[in-house]
Amino acid sequence: MKFNFETSYNQKSLSVMAKCIRKTSRKSKSKRSTILGWVVILFALFLCFYPEDGVFVINSNKVITFIVALIIFVVLIFQDKINGYFAKRHMLKGTEIAKSFFDTENRKEFVSETAVGKSQFSFDKIQEIAETSEYFVFIFSQNHAQIYDKNKLSGGSVDDFRAFLKDVTGKGIVSVK
């Protein structure tokens, strides 16, 4: 049996990929950064609204502090979309669409093709596998992953592919909401 995917690396898929990396291989680092971000926001808001000499005064320091708190808030809320945007900007031209082939007879590697070229990847290099409602994500490191669109799967069912992945990698699949 051969599983085939055609995945478009667009803003949506890259944002999902960033979210999966954040919730798996970067989980503890992300948690620390998020806590620090919220502490900084709360401290900045305290400084912005703390009355000086019993009187609330708006000055340039408070305005700048409020703007910085607002920027940190926006980054915390939209971090996956922001990371997806920068990932898209760093992609090579011609890698926007990837066709991937998984042969159940070849249990060591799989193939991915783009307009730039053809690459083989070893299953044992996959650190974690994440799954969303629309995608499978292979996480190779804290900075590298590949995404596969379930809607563009041919050659078998999603359940068959999931079972194949578990069998060939020996890893569980992390569900990411």
Image (tube, rainbow, N blue to C red):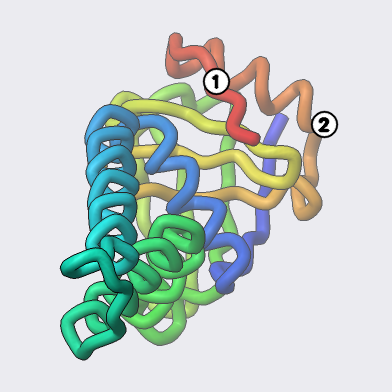
Other-residue count near label 2 (Cα within 10 Å), few / some / many at <14 / 14–19 / ≥20: few
Q: What is the three-letter code of the residue carrying label 1?
A: Ile
Relative placement, left or right, of 59 versus 152 is: left
Residue at (52%, 60%) from the top-left corner?
Answer: 15
Relative placement, left or right, of 62 versus 161 is: left
Whole-percent x, y for residue 158 in the image: 77, 31
Q: Nearer the viewer, residue 35 or 89?
A: 35
* Residue 118 visible: no
Whole-percent x, y for residue 163 in the image: 66, 16
Specify the quadrant that holds the C terminus. top right
Q: Which residue is mark 1?
A: 173
Q: How far is mark 1 from mark 2, CA to CA?
A: 16 Å
Residue 104 quadrant: top right
Residue at (72%, 29%) from the top-left corner?
Answer: 1
In front of the other: label 1 or label 2? Answer: 1
Q: Which residue is mark 2?
A: 157
